Image: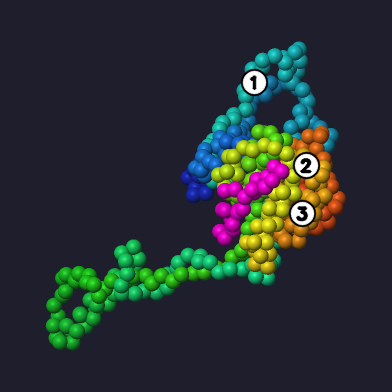
Amino acid sequence: MAIFKEHNNSSIGGDRAVEDRRRHRQLVEKSIKENLGDILSEESIIGQSKDKKIKIPIRGIKEYQFIYGKNSPGVGSGEGDEKRGQVIGKDKSDEGGNGNKGAGNDEGEDIYETEITLEDVLGYLMEDLELPEMDKKKFSNIVTQNGNKKAGYQKHGINPRLAKKRTTIEKLKRQQNKKRALNEDGINEEIERFPFNNDDLRYYRIKKTYKRESNAVIFCVMDVSGSMDSTKKYLARSFFFILSQFVSTKYSNVETVFIAHSTVAKEVNEFEFFHKVESGGTYISSGLNMALNIIDKRYNPEYWNIYTFYVSDGDNWSEDNERTVTAVKKLCEQCNMLGYAEIMSGYYTTNIKDRLMREVESKKFIAVSIKRKNELWSALKEMLKKE
């Protein structure tokens, strides 16, 4: 049902521009969320700064209004079970072939594009994502500096910390003291000029603040073998790019480890992970075992919240399937969560995902499939949904 609101520009609450801006923001947010799947699957976002502009289509804003009818008899009514958008009745003037056929002469819907930054897009992502099972480790909390806060005043400091109001108060106090002293001596002269001096200056005393944070590490493990064609690799990198941006934005004390593998695995830096192209066969266990080795050497599970994310097309050599299942079970014992994403698997794959889901009983293991580009966002949400 349409609700008509009277806009009275003479009243304080009747600013029509304010209402239009509010509706515009709602449309922008709605369009961003509807287009997240397409935005995240674009390989062009990888490695871009947060200032990169992204175009979003937005439907125009139209006010409700009455229009003249054709004064033809008849009433358009329904039985009560109609759905939104369903046409009730039919305009007789459309009979004769001019309805939806041909070019048509009706006014089109207003759609325009607006530009937002990648940082804005990531902001909408953060609302719905969270690392699960955080803060569950006995020794996982560390103390880090959170910032500074004002804690009183002092007579010495740097100019940016000058407390102007307090300095003025000190001057007035000194001025009143001088007046009182003159009155006690019987002198009633007015003090015409009373400048500041160094004794009046007061500066904010700054105290460092600390907070307890979770010690966490993210393992990004990606299959870069020959079966991962350019489309799959771009999609996998988009997945990990959004994941790494999410982690670095929301958690200040999280380390990230990048592992790329074919039949052998290597720990690589961030640039190599997102840009280097490789080929060869596939041993999924090689990447997972590399993560286990690094955990054993550098990240004691008693002190670290550990998260492992693995992306592949699922095309694994059958001789490696047993080793892969064993590695996944071991990682589930070490990690807060192990996420497995299978991208655009073909008919020739070994169905390693199905086997893992059958044989790995740990609740820490989450497996998702990404068959099309726009499913990347739903896969991320499934893995990182709030508890």
Residue at the image position 61 percent from the left and 64 percent from the top? 214
Q: Nearer the viewer, residue 178 or 199?
A: 199
Residue at the image position 82 percent from the left and 40 percent from the top? 350
Q: Nearer the viewer, residue 26 or 72?
A: 26
Dot label at residue 316: 2
Q: Quadrant of the C terminus?
A: bottom right
Dot label at residue 327: 3
Q: Nearer the viewer, residue 96 or 384?
A: 384
Distance of label 3 from label 2 (alpha carbons)? 14 Å
Q: Which residues lie in the magenta part?
A: 247-269
Judging by the rendered image, the residue that carries numbered circle 1 is: 106
Secondary structure beneath label 3: helix
Secondary structure beneath label 2: loop
83 vs 187: above or below: above
Residue type at mark 2: give it.
Answer: Asn
Q: Residue furthest top?
A: 96
Secondary structure beneath label 1: loop
Q: Is residue 268 magenta?
A: yes
Residue at the image position 22 percent from the left and 72 percent from the top? 197
Query: Is the residue under label 2 in contact with that under label 3 (CB below 8 Å)?
Result: no
